[in-house]
Image (cartoon, helix red, strand yellow):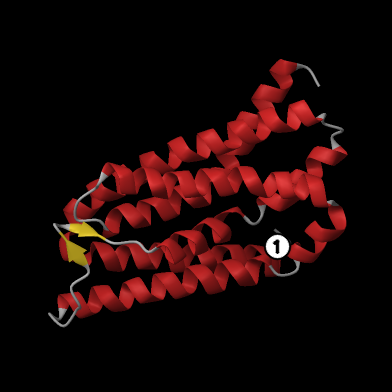
Amino acid sequence: MDIATLLIQSVLLAVGLAMDAFAVSISNGLAMKKIVLRHAIAIAASFGIFQAVMPLLGFLLGSSFADFIAQWDHYIALIFLGFIGGKMIYEGIQELRGKGEDKEKNGEYKFSFATLMFQAVATSIDALVVGVSFVAMKMTVLDMIIAILIIGGLTFVISMIGIFAGKRFGELLGSRAVIAGGIILVGIGLKVFIEHMFFGG
């Protein structure tokens, strides 16, 4: 594969794969009262790393493993994102009622390591199949490395944009921002599930 084709194909693929991560990043930004740069980098890096690692796993493990994962990926996305989103909605409602626990410190919303991992897995698991397609396209190892670096790097950048965009919307929504973020997460989980069950996505 010539380098120009590889670069164009990888960029387009990266943008497509990063859209769910972008939406989840907006949700995270909505939930933040204050953006701490290291936290934003950690969130975006989690998405970028997983989006790069999943195609690599698919490339190494082959189609049989990817086919097995494809039977369950929509359930994983629905459960993970539905749980996290539902929890955010509940906490947001409790906060509006003045009954919420103190989730902030110095104005910043806290995201646990487990939450980030659940989000990263849920938004990147479909990228396993992309790794299998690399084999079908007869990519060399070098081509594959270039592709996953582009996918991971662009996902990081797009996720950072999503976090700051979410923060901006959060300033407009005020105390309802956490609820809006939760609704987005639940919506993404439902989208993935419905696409797979009814449209073969």
Residue depicted at x 17% and y 61%: 105
x and y, in percent, of residue 108 in the image: 21, 57
List x then y, in percent, for residue 64. 87, 59
In this view of the protein, which residue sits in the foreground, 110 or 183?
Answer: 110
Disc 1 marks which residue? 199
Which image quarter is the C terminus in? Answer: bottom right
In the image, 39 versus 150, the foreground residue is 39
Q: Is residue 33 left or right of residue 111?
A: left
- The residue sitting at 79% across, 44% down in the picture is 59
Residue found 31% across the figure and 64% down from its top: 180
Q: Is residue 19 left or right of residue 56?
A: left
Horizontally, residue 131 falls left or right of residue 157, namely right
- Amino acid identity at mark 1: Phe
Q: Is residue 161 above or below residue 26?
A: above
Q: Does 143 sit above or below residue 75? A: above
Circle 1: element type = helix
Q: Residue at x 59, y 46 (%)?
A: 51
